[in-house]
Image (cartoon, rainbow, N blue to C red):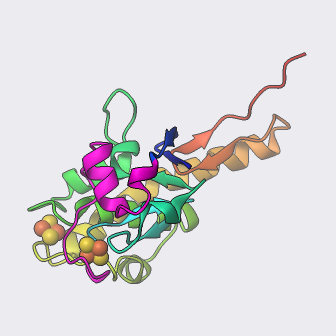
């Protein structure tokens, strides 16, 4: 069985199929961003994106993800380690204290902003309500998501500009706006 994690194809050994995916990510792939906290699908600390949708994975098995595209927090930053603008906004707004909720919170906010780059504060609050934070009181998190929305708005404008310029269409992915592939010949 294969799945895709942060753009890389992963061949899953048969022995790992029944393993919980959060343990597979943490122990087999050394991707420790997704946390194993409540274990009952209640807190959101284990949230990852699956095909660009947030999913709490603590009660899911590896075999449930055959052929799926997973994005963990480790895949959001640039390959040179530079933080994604949403991550940077969390840092700048003081939205991280113990950090336990942060990977799941950031990924949930990322999926939300990809769909809604012009959110109200109330919409942000509703988008993250399944991700619990015991430290921040949520205001700084909402500030961070609101600030980062400017980045997603810029991406949206660049997509619109590309589509009206007659150039091959760029596309938006969970990693950001990707230029269109230029056909050879
Ligand atoms: S650890 Fe999965 S929801 Fe809490
Ligand atoms: S920063 Fe500690 S739980 Fe959110």
Q: Is residue 31 visible?
A: no
Q: Which residue is drawn at 42% across and 78% down?
A: 127
Residue 146 in which image quadrant: bottom left
Q: Which residue is drawn at 28% across and 83% down?
A: 42
Pick the residue in front: 141 or 28: 28
- Residue 20 horizontal side relative to residue 43, left or right: right
* Residue situated furthest right in the rendering: 185
- Residue 27 horizontal side relative to residue 76, left or right: left
* Residue situated furthest front in the rendering: 15
- Residue 134 horizontal side relative to residue 9, left or right: left
Q: Considering the image in quadrants, where does the C terminus appear?
A: top right
Marks counted in the figure total 0
Dominant secondary structure (helix, strand or loop) of the stretch shown in magenta: loop
The region drawn magenta spans: 14-43
Q: Is residue 79 visible?
A: yes
Q: Is residue 32 magenta?
A: yes
* Vertical placement of residue 166 versus 17, above or below: above
Find residue 2 and report its horizontal and vertical position in percent: 56, 47
Q: Residue at x 71, y 50 (%)?
A: 160
Residue 167 in which image quadrant: top right
Q: Ligand 2, what quadrant? A: bottom left
Find residue 57 and report its horizontal and vertical position in percent: 38, 69
Pick the residue in front: 152 or 104: 104
Find residue 132 and report its horizontal and vertical position in percent: 23, 78
- Residue 73 horizontal side relative to residue 102, left or right: right
Pick the residue in front: 41 or 102: 41
Q: Does the magenta stretch include residue 52?
A: no
Find residue 19 and report its horizontal and vertical position in percent: 35, 61
């Amino acid at each position: 069985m294969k799945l895709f994690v942060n753009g890389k194809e992963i061949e899953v050994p048969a022995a790992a199929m029944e393993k919980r995916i959060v343990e597979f990510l943490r122990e087999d792939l050394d991707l420790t961003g997704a946390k194993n906290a409540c274990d009952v699908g209640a807190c959101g600390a284990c949230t990852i994106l699956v095909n660009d949708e947030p999913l709490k994975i603590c009660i899911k098995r590896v075999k449930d993800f055959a052929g799926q595209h997973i994005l963990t927090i480790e895949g959001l930053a640039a390959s040179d380690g530079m933080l994604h603008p949403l991550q940077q906004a969390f840092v700048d707004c003081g939205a991280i204290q113990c950090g336990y909720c942060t990977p799941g919170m950031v990924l949930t906010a990322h999926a939300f902003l990809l769909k809604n780059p012009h959110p109200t504060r109330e919409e942000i609050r509703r988008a993250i309500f399944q991700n619990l934070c015991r430290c921040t009181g949520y205001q700084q998190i909402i500030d961070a998501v609101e600030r980062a929305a400017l980045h997603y708005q810029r991406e949206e404008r660049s997509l619109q500009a590309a589509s009206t310029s007659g150039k091959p269409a760029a596309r938006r992915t969970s990693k950001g706006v990707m230029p269109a592939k230029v056909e050879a010949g």
